[in-house]
Image: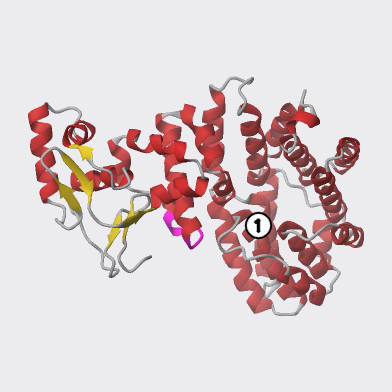
Amino acid sequence: MSSAEWHFRLLGEFLILSPSGDEVKIPSRKARALVALLALNNGIAVSREWLGRELWADKPRLSQQQNLRQAISAIPRELIDAARETCRISVTYRCDALECLDAGKDPGNLTLLPEMPEEIFDSYRSELASFAPSGKLGEAVRAAASLLEWATVSDPGKIIELLQGCQKLIPNMPLPLLERALRAGLRDLDPDHASYRWGMVQLASVLMWAGQCDEGIKVAKRTLDGWEPESDDPQWTTAAYSAATFLIFRGRLDKALTFIDAMASLAKSHGFEEAQRRFIHAKALWFGYGGNIDQALLLLESLPPSDIVCLHRALYYSLVPDAEKGRLAMASVSDLEAGNVRLESQARVALGYLLLAEGKRDEARVIFTEAIDFCETYGLELVRIHAIEGLALCAEDQVDAQSHLGRAEELRNRQRFPLLPGDRRRLASLLES
């Protein structure tokens, strides 16, 4: 933040910080709502008539203007320029809601903000405030999620448009929020609409991560029906890859292999290089969950490095075990602090297993405990199960170990994630004892 900049946080807990970092308190709810409206207009002067109507729509005009004058008097004079007919923010400032729109690179969404009802300005609440990643992306995630909550309740028709404008923020939002919003947005959207398939692909991916396997497979199949890869790549690739991983996690390994081979052949015939890489990765997961870790690693080593490929290399090297190669793989992962929370959750679990392979149980225990809370916050059920099972491997005695395994088994049954050969290999020492 520039030394001369104020900071307005409108989404999450309402907060105004002066350039020196001091908090400026505005006790009046209506005065805070007024600041929010002015801040959302990016410093541009707006009429008192409009402000009065927005904040006191149920009052006559005279009362609107009287109330507006009272609200203005409750705001420090240095913050706003209150002329006879207009008002505006008079300082240089940053606003998290506006940064959200900048992060989404969709200035067209700016029109959403002035239409938000008073309750949004009134509450300023978002449970995401405690969990969003640090840095500017975290501000954007919190803001986008709050906008999504508003759209889900007030105007579901805007949801898909809003999500498409903030695509890079999607992986950082809690899955229950995304699922609820996508279902609301798709419910009234014409299946022939250009954005419908995109929304269905997102829903399929969300369901996979949230552990709703049967429903996820159904959505993924429905999304693929009638698609032509030539016209629908990369959406086609994403939907097909999601369907493949659904089948693997659900334990339908034979069916998954047939599907992966068919999709890989189709991708090759169309010359889709990225799709071919995705299905090689899916095949590696198929081998890994089937218990053939060596073959999974061979396929992963054949792929160009990416965050997800390197993370899975690190995880599988910890099971071979070859912690040194696992550490090298983990070192190839780019900085995830301001990135994808789903990848971050996998990174935590992979690191936990690497620490176990190195005999550092106490350090691994801390990592797995943090990962469990992190995954629960964002609804990442399968990664959460892996973290709980990792915690069982760190246990001091068999009683604790069995307690953690029982908790993991309960979640597996609830989410219908069977214990596959690869999982058994990961837990072999405990299961054998």
Highlighted range, magenta: 129-135
Residue occupying the point 50% across, 56% down: 137
Quadrant of the rendered image containing residue 403 = bottom right
378 is higher (above) or lower (below) than 153: below
Main SS of the magenta segment?
Answer: loop
The residue where tag 1 is placed is 343
Residue 251 relative to residue 174: left or right: right
Quarter of the picture containing the C terminus is bottom right
351 is higher (above) or lower (below) than 165: below
Q: Is residue 132 magenta?
A: yes
Residue occupying the point 44% across, 59% down: 130
Residue occupying the point 64% across, 77% down: 363
Percent coordinates x, y for residue 156 in the rendering: 47, 29
Percent coordinates x, y for residue 320 in the rendering: 86, 69
Residue 52 relative to residue 292: left or right: left
Q: Is residue 407 visible?
A: no
Quarter of the picture containing the N terminus is bottom left
